[in-house]
Amino acid sequence: MSAQGPGAGIRVQGSVTPGAVVTVEVGGAATSVEVSTGDGTVLSFPVLPGGNARVRVPNVPGGTLLTVACGTGLRARVVLVEVLAP
Amino acid sequence: MSRPLPTRRRFLAAGTACLGALLSGCQVPCGQASPQPAPPAGPPAGSSEATAPARAAARPGTGDAELDALRHLAVDAPIAELVQHRLIFLVRIGDSYRKDPVMWRGVARLCDTALADPSIPDRRIFGKLLAQIIVYGEPEFAQPLAHLVPELRRLL
């Protein structure tokens, strides 16, 4: 998994395959992070005390890009995560 | 304390000033200190950016502030601004505004830029994301861009 793009304030660590659980570090006062692939499905995960969210990677084909976002409007923070084939 | 000029001298002074203004092409009133610097030249008439304010004024608001801001980015804002906000723009068209025709015009602009500009940051991933948005997009709006998908996926 690789994080891409201007996602200051949100960080994803580790490598993932479909179905894995990853920790997303979130700065600021966001209460949730939203994960989507662009197909209209949005998965929401709460930000836990300490500023981390535990995100389960959806079962998507290898090579799919996930967007992980928090916040609203143009100031929302987004990182891209590339899912590797299992 | 200055003495008022005789009528004839005042007439000559005014005539000289106006003649000077005419010869120099100055369009400021006589007596004004110095003209303000000219504003920077705008985009050429007829370009998309020259007509952007007119388009924005002609397009009614949606009542959704976020959508209005994204629509502005899509068609009115300079391409650099759209590229700067590309990720949140593509997130929102993928999850919230999937059937907004104005937003899809922004996707088309981003595709053109990704294909034409090798200096786009993270161009390979950007191309892949654009391709994915088109593939997963509403066919009615995404189909006209489908022919770009193979090329977007090949970007390095």
Image: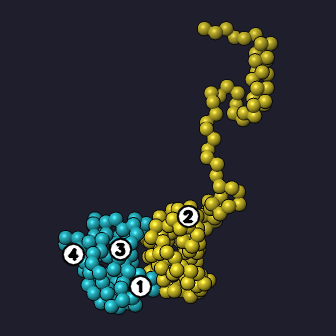
Chain colours: A cyan, B yellow
The amino acid at mark 2 is: Ile
Badge 1 and badge 3 in a common chain: yes
CB atoms of marks 1 and 2 within 8 Å: no
Instruction: Give the image quarter of residue B52.
Output: bottom right
Give the residue type that dot 1 points to.
Answer: Thr
Tell me the CA gap for discs 2 and 4. 37 Å
The residue type indicated by label 3 comes to Ala
Q: Nearer the viewer, mark 3 or mark 2?
A: 3
User: Is the C-beta separation of discs 4 and 1 under 8 Å?
Assistant: no
Q: Which residue is mark 3?
A: A3
Q: Quadrant for residue B60, please give it.
A: bottom right
Give coordinates of residue B128: x percent, y percent: 48, 79
Residue labelled with disc 1: A64
Q: Chain of mark 1?
A: A
Circle 1 crowding by C-alpha within 10 Å: few under 14, some 14–19, many from 20: some
Q: Is residue B12 left or right of residue B49?
A: right
Residue B45 percent location from the top left of the image:
70, 57
Q: The N terminus of chain A is located in which quarter?
A: bottom left
Residue A56 appears in the figure? no
Is label 2 or label 4 in front?
Answer: 2
What whole-number distance in Å separates the C-alpha atoms at marks 1 and 3? 13 Å
Residue B79 is tagged as: 2
Task: Name the residue that disc number 4 marks.
Answer: A48
> Image quadrant for the C terminus of chain A?
bottom left
The mark nearer the N terminus, 4 or 1, is: 4
